[in-house]
Image: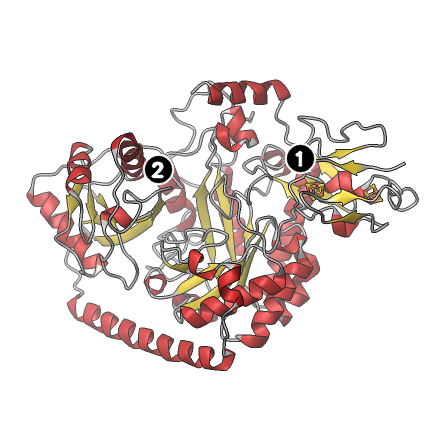
Amino acid sequence: MELKVLGQDNSKSASAPAGGCSSGTCGSSEDGMGHLPDHVRQKVHNHPCYSEEAHHFYARMHVAVAPACNIQCHYCNRKYDCANESRPGVVSELLSPDQAAKKVLAVASEIPQMTVLGVAGPGDPLANPERTFSTFRQIADKAPDIKLCLSTNGLALPDHIDEIVALNVDHVTITINCVDPEVGAKIYPWVFWNNKRIKGAKGAKILIERQQQGLEMLIERGILVKVNSVLIPGVNDEHLKEVSKIVKAKGTFLHNVMPLIAEAEHGTFYGVMGQRGPNKQELSDLQDACAGDMNMMRHCRQCRADAVGLLGEDRGQEFTLDKIDVLDIDYAAAMEKRAHVHAGIEAHRDALRAEKAEKTSIDLIAPQGTPPARIAVTTKGGGVINEHFGHAKEFLVYEASPEGVRFIGPRKVENAYCVGPDVCPAGEEKGTVLDAILAALDDCSAVLSAKVGIEPWSRLEDAGITPSGEFAMDEIDEAVKGMYLQLIEQGWSGKDLDVRAVG
Amino acid sequence: MALSIIESCVNCYACEPLCPSQAIAKADPHFLIDAKKCTECDGDFADPQCATICPIEGAILNAAGEAINPPGSLTGIPPFKLAEAMAEIQAR
Ligand code: SF4
Ligand code: SF4
């Protein structure tokens, strides 16, 4: 299979979910976790990163302490952060381990919903082991309730298993794009291995072996492992089904397929050579094929390398180095406060669940055969529709079908429609911002917000996306269901989903 | 006999811990090699370590002032392709 470049036929390189990864490996149970042992299911079920419901209530953060990398990926430009862990073209402020620890402790004291700290870049955390582990050690010491996680390309993973276990790291994400060195040669131009730069399939083979070895070692030691794959049409699309089968058989609890994002302006190999990314339908087909019902995981938004706060919000500006320098934190008190807030959240979630259980019936919510509708919502957290359309930088997309409501994934946009609480853009700029939002939501039939302004309202309608402020403060699932029923009532008849994926 | 790091360095820290001669130091605006300390890794490694891990084409020069990793050698992007893409973007 040759790497497709400029002028390729874009029509049909990904396929319908067929063969490859059928029953068993994809999980046959309702929550997509059928292949997992009980203790892992238990651990994942309530995890703020992996439970669709939990992530509405808890905050996570990443710190940029790991700049170096030991491989090159064709979707990455090393002038920026790791493209797999961040949005392409982003440069985050590099922190020393001491600065990072200070920042984490400040955030964990100011935002008591905080539960997880991740290190994912800008390079590879395990290509910077001293910096990564020194940050973790300080947090484990002063805020032992904070869960630690890291994302790695896997090359150095087998060398650091003991340290990962000793620090009680909660989960590790390995990016595995292939298990075949020939496919790997089209994704990884080189790896740095044993003091040499090794190119092509030979380098990819080493990487693949180390990834698989590291994966097995982690599972053996009882560490949760998630696998990320970047879907590259014409390069690894069919192959990912094989990857999925293998990593799940070894005990990975989640296989998360993400779209390639390749633009010439990012200066990446794929961007410059004209490799296309998958469209939204290709992406969800492959996610369905490889992951079974991934309702649980699709909310993973690959938290930006230095984002702070709940869901799509970013309170990073409150925690710049000069600001945290003057903060005086009582670690023990902060931890107690977190425990208190988390207990409150859990009580609230229990109540919600009980309420839902009462309402849940096995009845279809719409007549059999009604086409599914994708509906976007804007939220600041808490599991309700409480964000204004104009303030949203992230839209959560759900799919309603006669069987019920499931989560599809987050859609990020570069800019919110309004720049400040009261400032909405003027003139041409407004058009471009809105265009980007419309493109991100082009598979959706409706968008539900706390409020939608007049101008975006009519542009949304023109684009075939029904805006609504009617469900403000409603619980998301209920609101999506309500909107679906309204659409059906209005004679809506489905929407073409063959549109481009936006990360 | 020494290598040097020039302004295209993106300060990724990858080279610094690998140097067997402690010749590399973080500096502003970019990492620098102390020419008095650099041994070109002679006697320690077959390949100069800094230039072997550096991801940026052209950032590290040999003693003769030539890029050890010339354009296209690390990313696989042919230089003419990059020039074409740049021209196309600038024309927008
Ligand atoms: S060539 Fe070797 S000795 Fe010289 S700076 Fe690079 S790593 Fe250090
Ligand atoms: S590896 Fe290259 S880019 Fe990174 S710090 Fe060293 S010289 Fe600079």
The answer to whether the beta carbon of the residue marked 1 is less than 8 Å from any atom of ligand 2 is yes
Helix, strand or loop for disc 1: loop
Q: Amino acid at mark 1?
A: Ser
Residue at the spot 56% in from the left edge and 38% down from the top edge:
A76
Q: Position of residue A109 (x, y in %)?
A: 45, 72
Spot occupied by residue A90 in the image (x, y as percentages of width and height): 50, 43
Separation of marks 1 and 2 at Cα, in angstroms = 37 Å
Disc 1 designates what residue?
A: B8
Label 2: which secondary element = helix
Q: Is residue B85 left or right of residue B21?
A: left
Q: Judge by depth and name the residue closer to the eye, A338 or A354.
A: A338
Residue at point 43% right, 56% down? A317
Mark 2 lies on residue:
A280
Out of A144 and A20, give the one closest to the viewer.
Answer: A144
Q: Chain of mark 2?
A: A
Q: Amino acid at mark 2?
A: Lys
Please indicate whether residue A271 sits to the left or right of residue A462 in the image.
Answer: right
Displayed quadrant of residue A414: top left
Q: Can you say which quadrant of the picture contains the N terminus of chain B? A: top right
Q: Is residue A170 visible?
A: no
Image-based side of A467 in relation to A182, left or right: left
